[in-house]
Amino acid sequence: MLRKRYLDAEIKLTRLAFCPGEIICGMLLVDTTNDNNIAKMEVKLFGAAKVFCRDEEFAEHYNERPLFLHNEKILIDRNAIIYQKPQPLLIEIDDNGNDNEPLNGICPPGCHSDPSGLHAGRHGFAFDFQLPISGLETSFTSSNCPIAIKYHLIATIMNEDGVVLMECSQPITIVKPSHANLTRSLSANSATKCIDLKKSYAIHATMQLTKTCYKPAEPICAIITIHNRWKGSLKYAHFNIVQRVSYTAQVVGTSHQKAYSKNIDLTGVGLPPSQRKILPGTSFCFSPQYYVPALTPSFEISDCMKVDYVAKLTVGRSPNEIFGDITIPLTIATHIDGAPS
């Protein structure tokens, strides 16, 4: 909320999280010490998927200056006038010099108006927006990559000359329901890899999941088997989820585009406390206790960004000496169709 000496405004909502198709109901509270010549108030609902990043690789092509790239897809942009001061009454005079009925200033339907203007005091102006059923994506931010999906309500107060007296905003969260099919996730849920090492040594690892689609906070049922055909003990076997982010951006001021991708390793679990290492020539099978974190469901915005997930098993002598890993694609959703209730 922004403040000025003589004018204060704040957006109040019944709640801050919404799903597509729902109605956002709110009120703009305005507190003013005088009329301030306020002529119009608008509330905008704006949401966009944005990419803004810096690329060091092409610096030599731009006189060693930092290179910035961006991309933006507007998801929603709606505007509502909630107050408008009517124009002064106009008197129409016909060809004979007679006065006809006064012509009042025109105000948009549903907006508040008072011929005498907005008086000093505290005022409330209700508004609502109907969210579309399609076209929106779940709100998303990450400290590890330069992409975001954000939604805001922005209120603007203007005078008769159209000069903005002040603005205030309120972020909101959109949660788009996403569905995954349980039957399809029961296939392609196993992966095996032979990690070749020097001198004919190898490590055979298998990871099997009971399914590949999950909801946040749901336990992942995995069975991991490791055959150690190396000369030393394996003290590191780590299971976790990797968030894979891909996005495209355009060099500011040019038509040049570049695609990027980034893998973000989420917190995972290792060998059980009862098995601190896997000795040479032995095998070990275990099921890690792991719950899906509070993740944004998998999504894709064409020509902009994509987020998906994989389950990953990493094997090594230690966290600093990794031999290899295997992955299985996952689908994170809010609803699993076909799952028992």
Image (tube, helix red, strand yellow):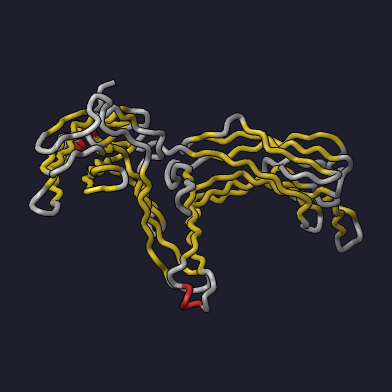
Determine whether, in the image, residue 315 is placed left or right of residue 17.
Answer: left
Q: Residue at x 51, y 35 (%)?
A: 18
Q: Residue at x 31, y 33 (%)?
A: 269
Q: Is residue 25 above or below residue 195?
A: above
Determine whether, in the image, residue 23 is placed left or right of residue 230.
Answer: right
Task: Using the rendered image of the protein, determine whether residue 192 is visible from the camera's viewpoint.
Answer: no
Judged from this view, the residue extending furthest toward the top is 341
Judged from this view, the residue extending furthest toward the front is 232
For this rendering, which residue is in front, 180 or 119? 180
Counting labels gives: 0
Q: Is residue 341 above or below residue 134?
A: above
Image coords of residue 66 (percent x, y): 53, 69
Task: Using the rendered image of the protein, determine whether residue 100 is visible from the camera's viewpoint.
Answer: yes
For this rendering, which residue is in front, 299 or 57? 57
Q: Residue at x 38, y 47 (%)?
A: 264
Image coords of residue 87 (percent x, y): 82, 52
Quadrant (top left, top right, bottom left, bottom right) of the C terminus: top left
Determine whether, in the image, residue 164 is placed left or right of residue 128.
Answer: right
Q: Residue at x 52, y 75 (%)?
A: 64
Determine whether, in the image, residue 281 is placed left or right of residue 90.
Answer: left
Image coords of residue 72 (percent x, y): 49, 58
For this rendering, which residue is in front, 321 or 130? 321
Q: Quadrant of residue 231?
A: top left
Quadrant (top left, top right, bottom left, bottom right) of the N terminus: top right
